[in-house]
């Protein structure tokens, strides 16, 4: 059928105006809450969804001031703002736009919503305004759960599962942050901070003789000691296996060595209980090095590694500063 025939078809004749009752039925059963007020901000209509959202039956709100549903800070200004808009006939920065808002439920709970308010114009000499409201509680709860889950996943990505200490990735990130802070607050000739590498002595023999379950228990004991013995500002992390990383912000090499010695002594003095009722003592060797301005973390860790190797070579269970 050609376009001319379509345009000439009787089917294109103007349709009769729909009865207003159809619009009313549609609004009444709409999923979005709907409210209509007059120019004096009195509620003239609410649909079923608005009744459910507000907790009021329709007849309870008709003729009542809209302010009873608004947050206190908004209610004190709302009527004046509506009248000012009507008198000025200026373009509204609110009407016709979707924005986040809140309404007061019958039980006084503030319900978060998305709202689109509209100027419905004049009817029989009265100005009317309407609004569509969408309950966003479920969406916000879901967003909060997703944010919490994301935070947990991020935490897990930065945490060693066995010891609950920061892992290597977290250690490196915190070291970079400490370096940046120190670079802003120290002179060019000053030391930024100190780092350390700690390693349990003869740990392979512990696993071979007692099994990995005992080895894991030893690692958890050592992790607890590191958390309890280090200073609040220090960072202790599990780099992998029986190796731990130490970070001493705003600390000289001599000060870091003293803290490391305290950690070493605490590890040597704290036994790990075994299933048979006996206790297993372990020792730790630690190498520390300073991280001067302009140096890299890798370079400082390599220096600490060499100091650790020297501690192992000299008999273990000691602290050596690079």
Image (cartoon, grey):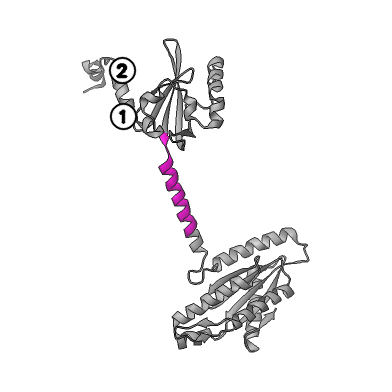
**55 left or right, relative to 258:** left
Instruction: Magenta stretch: give its range.
Output: 134-152
Q: Position of residue 90 (x, y in %)?
A: 55, 19
Residue at point 45%, 44% (across, down): 140
Q: Position of residue 67 (x, y in %)?
A: 50, 26
Q: Which mark is residue 20?
A: 2
Along the viewing direction, whichever of 112 and 299 lies nearer the viewer: 112
Along the viewing direction, whichever of 303 and 259 lies nearer the viewer: 259
Q: Position of residue 290 (x, y in %)?
A: 70, 72
Residue 119 lies, with reference to residue 256, above or below; the image says: above
Which secondary structure class fits the magenta region best?
Answer: helix
Between circles 1 and 2, the one closer to the viewer is: 1
Q: Which mark is residue 167?
A: none
Q: CA distance from mark 1 to mark 2?
A: 15 Å
Figure quadrant of the C terminus: bottom right
* Residue ID for mark 1: 29
Picture quadrant of residue 192: bottom right
Q: Position of residue 188 (x, y in %)?
A: 77, 63
Sequence-wise first label, 1 or 2: 2
Residue at point 56%, 73% (across, down): 224
Say whether residue 46 is visible.
no
Residue 138 lies, with reference to residue 132, above or below; the image says: below
Tell me the crowding category of disc 2: few under 14, some 14 to 19, or many 20 or more residues within 10 angstroms, Cα based. Answer: few
Local secondary structure at mark 1 = loop
Q: Are marks 1 and 2 in contact (CB under 8 Å)?
A: no
Q: Is residue 66 magenta?
A: no
**189 left or right, relative to 217:** right
Residue at point 25%, 15% (across, down): 13
């Amino acid at each position: 059928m050609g376009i001319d025939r379509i345009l000439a078809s009787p089917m294109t004749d103007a349709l009769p105006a729909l009865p207003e009752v159809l619009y009313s039925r549609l609004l009444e059963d709409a999923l979005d809450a709907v409210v209509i007020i007059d120019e004096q901000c009195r509620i003239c209509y609410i649909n079923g969804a608005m009744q459910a959202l507000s907790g009021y039956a329709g007849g309870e709100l008709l003729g009542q001031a809209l302010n009873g549903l608004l947050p206190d800070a908004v209610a004190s200004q709302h009527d004046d703002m509506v009248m000012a808009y009507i008198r000025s006939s200026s373009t509204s920065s609110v009407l016709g736009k979707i924005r986040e808002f809140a309404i007061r439920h019958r039980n006084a709970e503030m319900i978060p919503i998305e709202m689109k308010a509209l100027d419905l114009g004049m009817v029989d000499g009265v100005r009317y305004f309407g609004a569509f409201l969408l309950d966003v509680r479920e969406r916000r709860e879901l967003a909060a759960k997703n944010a919490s889950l994301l935070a947990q996943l991020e935490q897990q990505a930065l945490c060693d599962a066995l010891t609950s200490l920061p892992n290597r990735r977290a250690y490196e990130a915190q070291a970079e942050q400490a370096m940046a802070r120190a670079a802003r607050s120290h002179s060019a000739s000053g030391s930024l901070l100190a780092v350390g590498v700690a390693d349990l002595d003869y740990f392979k023999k512990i696993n071979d003789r007692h099994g990995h379950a005992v080895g894991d228990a030893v690692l958890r004991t050592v992790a607890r000691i590191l958390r309890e013995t280090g200073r609040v500002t220090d960072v202790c992390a599990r780099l992998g296996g029986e190796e731990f990383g130490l970070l001493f912000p705003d600390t000289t090499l001599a000060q870091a060595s003293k803290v490391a010695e305290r950690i070493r002594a605490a590890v040597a003095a704290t036994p790990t209980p075994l299933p048979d009722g006996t206790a297993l003592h372990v020792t730790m060797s630690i190498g520390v090095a300073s991280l001067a301005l302009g140096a890299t973390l890798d370079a400082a860790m390599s220096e600490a590694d060499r100091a650790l190797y020297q501690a192992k070579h000299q008999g273990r269970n000691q602290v050596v500063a690079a």
